[in-house]
Amino acid sequence: MLAPPRGAVAILGRNGAGKSTLLKTIAGEIRPMSGIIRFDQQQTVDEPSERRVRRGLGYVPQEHGIFDRLTVRENLLLGAINQKDKSGIDRVLAIFPKLARRLAQTAATLSGGERKMLAIGRALVGWPKLLMLDEPTEGVWVGVIDEIAERLAELAKSISLVVVEQHIELALSVAQYAYVMDRGSIALEGPAGRVRADANLARYLSP
């Protein structure tokens, strides 16, 4: 599996196919039983997750990972904790202007869509080379889903994205290339348009 320096890759598959496990393994939360992970031309299997972050790997887990009792500003500052330059926060607020109007609010008071934006924004503060997102639109109102999709498409022009997403059309509209997983392995791959048209796609996505 490859991710380009810029652009978006979608990872599709039914529940339990191994998509989230793959992202956690790349992020360093799970050690692989075999195989090699290379990031920025360096092998990372033995690297702790914090070193991968410092080298430019961003990860937004399915469960957000934001702190409800902290304000939006404080959550974003956590994303900048290893950054000498805090201007990344301003860049995030330009991408997600709704957060700029919520800076003093605690994360617990945000809507589902705003919480997703905050989780993505915190990972973006350091402007990673590769940003992995696990179900970025799960539990989000349809109007906000479109907004998040637009932001991801814009981000893909500047950095590399790996997106795990149950909304297949959304994922394939953002990504240029797609992988379909089945039982922990790659069952299908190709340019997004070709994967969308593949007659086998429905079989790999059905429960």
Image: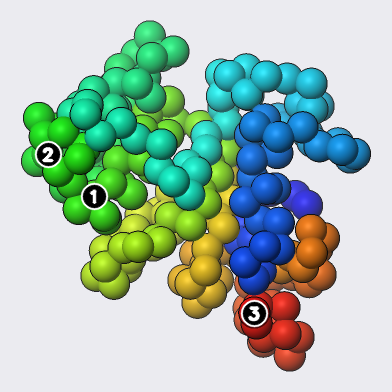
Residue picked out by circle 3: 207
Residue 197 location (% of width, % of height): 67, 87
Q: Earlier in the sequence, mark 2 or mark 1?
A: 2
Which quarter of the picture shows residue 37?
A: top right
Amino acid bearing label 2: Arg
Q: CA distance from mark 2 to mark 1?
A: 9 Å
Could you say whether the residue bearing mark 1 is in a helix, strand or loop?
Answer: helix
Binning the other alpha carbons within 10 Å of mark 2 as few (below 14), some (14 to 19) or many (20 upward) gives: some
Q: Is residue 189 above or below residue 161?
A: below
Query: Which residue is nearer to you in this view: 90 or 53?
Result: 53
Binning the other alpha carbons within 10 Å of mark 1 as few (below 14), some (14 to 19) or many (20 upward) gives: many
Which quarter of the picture shows residue 24?
A: top right
Amino acid bearing label 1: Glu
Q: Are marks 2 and 1 in contact (CB under 8 Å)?
A: yes
Residue picked out by circle 2: 102
Give me the residue at 66% from left, 56% from top: 19
Q: Earlier in the sequence, mark 2 or mark 3?
A: 2
Residue picked out by circle 1: 114
Q: CA distance from mark 1 to mark 3?
A: 30 Å
Residue 192 location (% of width, % of height): 63, 72
Give me the residue at 16% from left, 33% from top: 106
